[in-house]
């Protein structure tokens, strides 16, 4: 077994955005949520606004970066993307 794979449970391994089960490969979106300092994996294909809604995050309080590029609520993300949800900080 490749040393870069992490065993999740019997016959299921993970590497980056991929889940390997037996001989099948599943692609899962990797999401980092800055506010919670949490990384999660989620199966999702669709608009950023819908992703934020599914995570119960108010879109006016965050910036979203996908694969190193700032994106909007109308942009589409897919399972193979690496997404970061960053908190907006304002002050006076």
Image: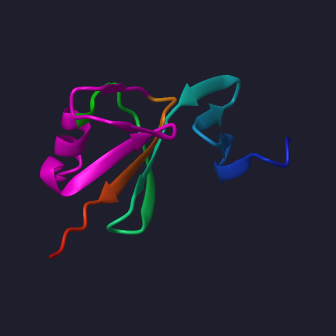
Quarter of the image for residue 34 reads bottom left
Q: Position of residue 80 (x, y in %)?
A: 52, 29
Residue that lies at the very extreme toward the bottom in this rendered image: 92
Please indicate whether residue 17 sits to the left or right of residue 55 in the image: right
Instruction: Locate the N terminus and report the quarter of the image it occupies.
Output: top right
Q: Residue at x 17, y 52 (%)?
A: 56
Q: Residue at x 63, y 42 (%)?
A: 16
Task: Name the one closer to the observer, 78 or 75.
Answer: 75
Instruction: Locate the C terminus and report the quarter of the image it occupies.
Output: bottom left
Task: Name the one closer to the observer, 42 or 63.
Answer: 63
Q: In this figure, what is the number of numbered marks?
A: 0
Q: Position of residue 67 (x, y in %)?
A: 51, 37
Quarter of the image for residue 75 reads top left
Q: Is residue 44 magenta?
A: no
Quarter of the image for residue 89 reads bottom left
Task: Name the one closer to the observer, 20 or 61.
Answer: 61
Q: Position of residue 79 (x, y in %)?
A: 45, 29
Please indicate whether residue 81 sits to the left or right of residue 58 in the image: right
Q: Position of residue 51 (x, y in %)?
A: 26, 38
Q: Is residue 77 magenta?
A: yes
Residue range in magenta is 49-78
Q: Is residue 37 above or below residue 59?
A: below
Please indicate whether residue 5 sits to the left or right of residue 59 in the image: right
Residue that lies at the very extreme toward the front in this rendered image: 92
Q: Residue at x 66, y 47 (%)?
A: 10
Colour option used: rainbow
Q: Residue at x 57, y 38 (%)?
A: 17
């Amino acid at each position: 077994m490749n040393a870069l794979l992490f065993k999740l449970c019997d016959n299921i391994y993970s590497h980056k955005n991929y889940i390997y089960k037996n001989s099948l490969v599943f692609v899962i979106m990797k999401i980092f949520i800055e506010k919670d300092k949490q990384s999660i994996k989620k199966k999702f294909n669709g608009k950023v606004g819908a992703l934020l809604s599914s995570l119960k995050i108010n879109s006016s309080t965050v910036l979203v970066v996908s694969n190193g590029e700032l994106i909007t609520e109308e942009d589409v993300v897919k399972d193979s993307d690496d997404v970061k949800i960053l908190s907006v900080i304002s002050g006076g």
